[in-house]
Amino acid sequence: MPDTIDPAIASDWLAIGDSLGLVPGTSRRARLLGHDLHVRRRPDGALEAWFETEPTRPCHATDHCGFILLCLGDEPRPLFELAAFANPARRFLYMGGFGIHSGPLRVVENFLDMAHFPFVHAHILGSEEATEVRGYEVELDARQELWARDCKFIQPLASADAKGGADVDYVYRVVNPFSPMLYKHPAGRSAELADIIFLFIQPTDEERCIAHFAISLFDAQSSSGEIMAFQQNILGQDKPILENHVHKKLPLDPRIEVPSRADAASSTFRRWLRDIHLRWGIEAQSTEPRPRLSVEVAGKRTVARDIVEFRLRSPRRGPLPSATAGSHLDVHLPNGQIRQYSVCGQDDEGYTIAVKREADSRGGSIALHESVQAGMQLEIGLPKNNFRLDPRIEHAVLIAGGIGITPILAMARDLAARGKRPVLHYFCRSAEHAAYRAELEALLGTNLHLHLGLSPQQTEDQVRQALQAGGDAHAFACGPAPLMQCIERVAAERHWPADRVHFEYFRRTTPVEATGPAFTVELARSGRRVQVASDTTIVEALRAIDIHLDTSCEQGVCGTCLCTVIDGEPDHRDQYLSAGEKASHMQMLPCVSRSRSATLVLDL
Ligand code: FES
């Protein structure tokens, strides 16, 4: 085996095309894992393959389940089992090999991600009326195959022969890191009759691949052309998105890519790749701290009592990275602290943030109010967005309390610019505390409901009014903890689906419970081990040995300290990661979270 083949995948069988595509007595070239190969079907039907640069070096080749599979390593794994494929009542349709300029592992992860259906495959595999991904089971079995079972999704047009919307059951199976398949059948129909969709990836290079798309099904109605057109349309919708990733290889290091809310299957997929120590096709780990931008304070003005607005621009007057509505920035303060501030807006000149002077601040807001002046330079992180405004949302109820108006203002501007008419409930202590009032009145007219100086009970009454609207509305809320708790409570009482109520917390709504049994943290990059006492956080224990992680809130809400877990089971105590991310145990927030296992190995 050439020593350039990653041992983690050397024994895997990988598809290079369909069996019928190579007739006896012919040969073809194929590229796999960066190697050029020749594959020939002998007149007796058997396959043989060899490396182009070393014709005397053979590689393993076989036909299996309609595909030609090759293995470049010396000791191939057993072939995956698929008894259903042999059922003579099934049709097997190979729909072609599609070149994709994106990393092969990206394509597999996208295939596993149900959350994109309503947005990328709207009106076909998902709908804007049902964006929630319901809970499902994920496991890596004894044969090292990844299974995601009991996945259910409402699909407007699940297949070429579908007559209308249906609740569809999915089972995902990934037989090796490049070979996923999907068993799909309408709820109520026997799993034996499931369509089996193959998306076998031919990993030609680390940033390019060929997706071999095939289906095994019982559909006797649809013509091959109809089935192929349906499935090719799906892949055609995914392709431009896959090709637009900044990092074509799959990043396993959360510092490379702005952390996103991955679902359980893709989290488990990434953890699996990390556990087998796969390097090929994986974005190299960053040894650098998160990237920063230098910006100049172009302007500073008071926009309400105790609230100051800062305009930040590139010192070279060039464009700054896009900050979508709901984004926030890490601002590195002159006193060394890092604080997060929502982006109120972005124009050709740069970003606008607004900061409230907090009397009980730990110094962040006071430093900005008192020490930062127009003309000074600051360092900021790249915009991150954990409070996304989906552009397809038609009806939005926006709720802001005090300085919580900052991300909500960006959303109101964005929605209004797209011709939508959001409703905004803005709770403030008094008129002089209401920032951006004139702009909001001009933008929203009678859809602006300004609530000044309300008691807790009056506030709750107004929240009840605000959340009366159900239907397809989405609610977005940002404000102080009592307001957020009130919204959480009322939304639950009114049965708002969790995926339609979006919160941006700037403080915890529950007390931090950061103590617990002692454990050991091992730092994978240096091998150093540190004991974390029962009343100490991981961040504090590391600080004591002079290892300083980037932190900000130290309450488990901002995500600044996010790090990768290599081994062990974290005890998550944050309000930042989603339930799926917590269940995957791939990442944790060491400012509050602890360990359920005696030792926790972190990628530090
Ligand atoms: S520092 Fe904010 S989540 Fe850890």
Image (cartoon, rainbow, N blue to C red):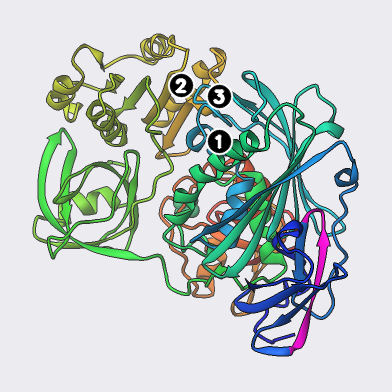
Residue nearest the observer in this picture, 562 or 482: 562
Residue on which the image places disc 3 = 130
Asked if disc 1 is less than 8 Å from ligand 1, the answer is no
The quarter of the picture where residue 409 lies is: top left
Query: Does the stretch in magenta take in 62?
Result: yes
Relative to 13, residue 426 above or below: above
Tell me whether circle 3 and circle 2 mark residues in contact (CB < 8 Å). Answer: no
Identity of the residue drawn at 57% across and 47% down: 262
Q: x and y percent of residue 356 in the render? A: 24, 40
Q: x and y percent of residue 59 in the render? A: 77, 79
Relative to 496, residue 409 above or below: below
The answer for how far apart the CA atoms under marks 3 and 2 are is: 22 Å
Label disc, if present, on residue 495 of the rendered structure: none
Q: x and y percent of residue 264 in the render? A: 65, 45
Q: Which residues are magenta?
A: 56-66
Q: Is residue 76 left or right of residue 122?
A: right
Q: Is residue 136 left or right of residue 285?
A: right
The answer for how far apart the CA atoms under marks 1 and 3 are is: 10 Å
Residue on which the image places disc 1 = 117
Q: Nearer the viewer, mark 1 or mark 3?
A: 1
Q: Secondary structure at mark 1?
A: helix
